[in-house]
Image: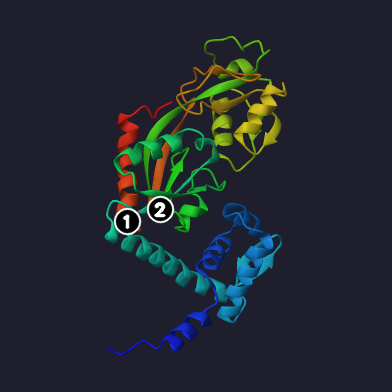
Amino acid sequence: MRPIDIAQLTYALSSWIVDTEALRWFQHVADGMTVTEVADIYGVSQPGVSRALSRVEQEAGTPLLQRSGRTLRLTLAGAAFKQHVDRLMVDLDDGIAAVEQLLDPGTGVVSLSYPLSLGTWFVPKLIRDFRVVRPRVRFRLQRSAVGEPGAISRLLATRAVDLEITTERVRGPGVQWRRVAIEPLLLAVPDDHHLAGATDVDLARVAGEPFIVRRAPSGMREKVLGLCAAAGFEPEIAYEVDDLPTVRGFVGAGLGVSVVPTVGAEATTQLGPVRFVPLRDEEARREIGIAWLAERRLLPAAESMRRYAVRWGATSDARA
């Protein structure tokens, strides 16, 4: 076998100055994320992301991105480059994981994304129970960025994660989805509201009252609007906010009512100045499921997690 020339190897490695993280950031921006969103997800500065993207372009030898308003869009060269980057990053991730799991089949890393509202109960319970049977499997967790209702997040679409927990049924080319749990929805009212002491209620009882809803795009917002329409009224939207904790805060301040998820089996009738009343409306629930891409072969740890999640939802107390 020909001996390795260390100096030549060092030069070859140093000539490629772009690191894999910079390529991941390029993927996200190319798929529509802003530099700010990428910086928030990875916990880095915006200038740091911008410099990394510049390094990618310098190495490619041509502009790959061009500014259009507040967003960056692919150039013709960028679109051609992106196809190869996608394949490269998937192969790299799978290769590293395959070697790790070959050395120790009981280990592995599962990359999982999920919406903020499931981070306080569903995801921790699922991982806790899974680690009872696979204690050495590690997780790389990311919060799903808000996308269009009914669609997977950019993280799963770009294969940045193996699996995604969703709060609704999702569809798309090559997307596979299985329901894991059903979470009831509740009417949230201030503690001095005339319905605060009710055991359950029809949503039509609050027709005409100001509503607090999530800002679009939001699956929860669409669910609330659909429930109101089924109940025979269009809600008077007083405030649009960015997350469910803020929804509850505005309700507690007496600024309106809302429909919110139970946040797990430990749903309570009261949280501070907010009362939660079960809804009698037939569709007052949301589906929690797990999604993956059919064309991507999951490595053993991720495949084990996928199978476990589906069984777990059917046999455990995952339902709220």
Identify which residue is drawn at 29% across, 40% down: 133
Q: Which mark is residue 289?
A: none
The colour scheme used here is: rainbow
Crowd rating for badge 1 (residues with CA inside 10 Å; few <14, some 14–19, many 20+) = some
- Image x and y of residue 96, in percent: 37, 64
Residue 96 versus residue 248 in the image, above or below: below
- Image x and y of residue 245, in percent: 62, 32
In what element is the residue under mark 1? loop
Q: Disc 1 vs disc 2: Cβ atoms closer than 8 Å? A: yes
In what element is the residue under mark 2? loop
Identify which residue is drawn at 47% across, 55% down: 157
Residue 291 versus residue 272 in the image, above or below: below
Horizontal side of residue 98 vs 113, given as left or right: left
Crowd rating for badge 2 (residues with CA inside 10 Å; few <14, some 14–19, many 20+) = many
Mark 1 or 2 closer to N-term?
A: 2
* Amino acid under disc 2: Asp
Quick check: can you spot residue 309? no
Question: Mark 1 to mark 2: distance in Å?
Answer: 9 Å
- Image x and y of residue 295, in percent: 35, 58
Q: Which mark is residue 162?
A: 2
Residue 194 versus residue 64 in the image, above or below: above
- The one nearer the camera, 221 or 122, is 122
- The one nearer the camera, 62 or 139, is 139
Image quarter where the C terminus lies is: top left
Quick check: can you spot residue 303? yes
Task: Identify the residue position indicated by label 1 in the image.
Answer: 299
Identify which residue is drawn at 56% across, 63% down: 25
- The one nearer the camera, 57 or 224, is 57
Give the quadrant of residue 239: top right
Horizontal side of residue 171 vs 70, given as left or right: left
Identify which residue is drawn at 44% across, 54% down: 161
* Amino acid under disc 1: Leu
